[in-house]
Image: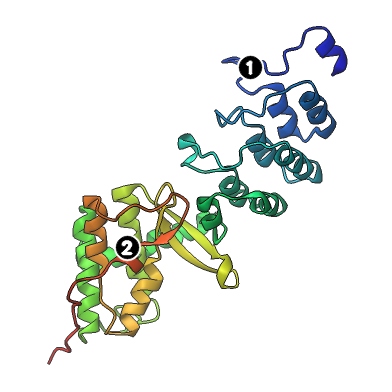
Amino acid sequence: MKWLVAYGLDVNAFNDANPTPPLGLACSRGHEEVVKQLLSEGASLTTDSSVRNPLLCAIIGGDTDAHTRIVELLVAQGIDSSRRYPNLNNMSALDIAQQYGRAKITAILNRGSTDVTQLEVRRCSEQPFPESTLQALRAEVAQGTKLLGVSPDDDPATIVAAVDAFVYNWQCGDKPPKRVLDPESAPFTLGAVWGQQLVRAFAWEWAIVTFHEHGDTTAPGVLSPDRALAVYPIHFVMGCLQDSTVDTTILIAFNMLAAGKVGDTSPGSYFNLMDGVHRIIPRIATPKR
């Protein structure tokens, strides 16, 4: 490396064909000694682009001890770990470390974080749905829409209104026979239908969310692209079906999202939308006679 620098190697060189500078490449491949040499020769710790950010290169590059030590080195050198990138769903280095399951790197970044949004992200992490789970979810959606008397291709607002009405009627005592819809599977079926409409209407995404402040418990949820908002449709429906005093605000929440009236929430905070949706006068389920 010293020989190359002596003969004119630009340690910060990049172009359209090779958009990642030498430091990013070394970080990605876990070449710890090369990283140290490049830094000593003045390699830039730029974070202006996701492909030129050496920290992201190290995180995505691998989960070896060398990659972890490189992250420690970059953090010690003062690299900005809080920057978010629109082309990466507004994620930061910490978000990406969590997404890739880099436990040691996540701990390092958490240790050095002073950003409020970063502190919020520590409370939750996520994993994508396995393909087998997505297939099961699609089957539940097909069954649920048939039960509700709608088509999977109907307007999302129409389908959500049908879910809302079905859950409310259930609370009022109008339950289908067990052979039509088992009470134990009802939250999964109805929650899958509702959640899938958030995917269709707003480009939200299904994920398994881990709550680190609650013993690392997990729940399937639907998340906004910037992870500012989350809805846990299966658990919310379960709560409504088990307790008729819970106000069914499924349609209200959807309409608020459609109208852009959910308030300002920090990206990456995983705020549970349903916690913030309330009627001025709660709708009380009245048993049908």
Identify the image quadrant of residue 147: bottom left
Identify the image quadrant of residue 17: top right
Residue 224 horizontal side relative to residue 67, left or right = left
Residue with the mark numbered 2 = 193
Q: Secondary structure at mark 2?
A: helix
Q: Is residue 245 visible?
A: yes
Kindly identify the residue that appears in the image at 72 percent across and 26 percent down. 23
Residue 216 place in picture, x, y as percent: 59, 69
The amino acid sitting under disc 1 is: Phe
Residue 143 place in picture, x, y as percent: 32, 66
Residue 280 place in picture, x, y as percent: 18, 72
Kindly identify the residue that appears in the image at 48 percent across and 57 percent down. 207
View extreme (left): residue: 289
Kindly identify the residue that appears in the image at 72 percent across and 37 percent down. 74
Residue with the mark numbered 1 = 14
In the rendered view, how is the structure colored?
Answer: rainbow
Q: In the image, which disc is placed on residue 264?
A: none
Kindly identify the residue that appears in the image at 20 percent across and 66 percent down. 162
Residue 56 horizontal side relative to residue 43, left or right = left
- In terms of depth relative to the viewer, which is nearer, 81 or 66? 81
Identify the image quadrant of residue 57: top right
Q: Secondary structure at mark 1?
A: loop
Among the two numbered marks 2 and 1 on one chain, the one whose residue lies closer to the N terminus:
1
- Give the crowd class for mark 1: few <14, some 14-19, many >=20 residues within 10 Å: few
The amino acid sitting under disc 2 is: Val
- In terms of depth relative to the viewer, which is nearer, 61 or 92? 92
- Give the crowd class for mark 2: few <14, some 14-19, many >=20 residues within 10 Å: many
The quarter of the image holding the C terminus is bottom left
Residue 199 place in picture, x, y as percent: 35, 52
Q: Is residue 25 above or below residue 168?
A: above
